[in-house]
Image: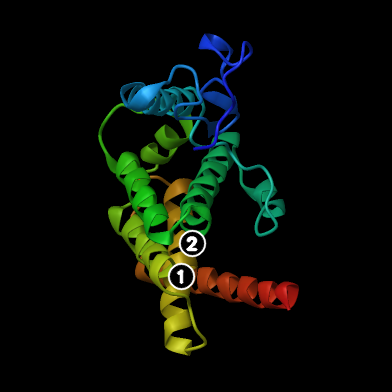
Amino acid sequence: ILGPIYSPTQVLDLRPAIRWKRGLYRVGSSTHPAAGVPSVLASAVLAARCVREDLDASPLLSPVRTSSTFGPSMQIIRGQERRNALRYLYAFFRLLDDLVDEAPGGTLGFEMAKDLVRRLQSGDDEPDQGVMVLKSCMIPPHVWDAFLEALEFDAKWKVGDNPPEVTWYSQRVAGIVGEAVAYVLSPGRELGKQELQARHRLGRALQRFNIVRDVRRDA
């Protein structure tokens, strides 16, 4: 077992605290408080409580103000309220995607993403301003269901070079985002079939553009 040696500078509350750096927490017998199995378990509970307190104290979503994909085009959207809603939407999609791509174990990240979507769809009071804004846009459940299908695919497999597979994936990860944008711009409006198809096609085209861009960058 590795840990600081016992010395006059490593006793009682002089031992390393649970909160270390932003987003990083210590837990175990070398922290304060901890010594012996019961105290180590208590330390784990306290560490979990610290994480929860810090998460509750910080916003889940921050409105993203720039993006290589559509940042400059935000200027043509009229109304600061709608622009902020779109930024929250972008931030939420990015958060879900990053959970699957960067969390240790894609499946774990996918379960975390599902929990966030359930939080967005629940009727509970929501302290996070960004989530409240997206709730007010009344985005239909099938939008989130389709995006989660793509994330689940990401968590378990990777998109190959099969054209039907790329189209299926692009529709769920990008075409559906184009549909979500319409609900953000006009909450509660029913979209016509032609408009839906146009938004889906544009989203899929942008996804293919991103794929080509990333291939060139990663080559």
Q: Quadrant of the C terminus?
A: bottom right
CB under 8 Å between callouts 1 and 2?
A: yes
What's the mark number on residue 200? 1
Q: In this view, does 94 lie above or below 11?
A: below
Q: In which quarter of the image is residue 16?
A: top right
What's the mark number on residue 178? 2
**Residue 196: % across, % down:** 41, 67
Residue at image position (56%, 33%) is 23
Nearer to the camera, 45 or 114: 45
**Residue 51 visible here:** yes
**Residue 46: % across, % down:** 39, 22
**Residue 139 visible here:** no
**Residue 148: % across, % down:** 36, 60
Q: Earlier in the sequence, mark 1 or mark 2?
A: 2
**Which amino acid does the dot numbered 2 rest on?**
Gly
- Mark 2, residues whose alpha carbon is within 10 Å: few (<14), some, or many (≥20)? many
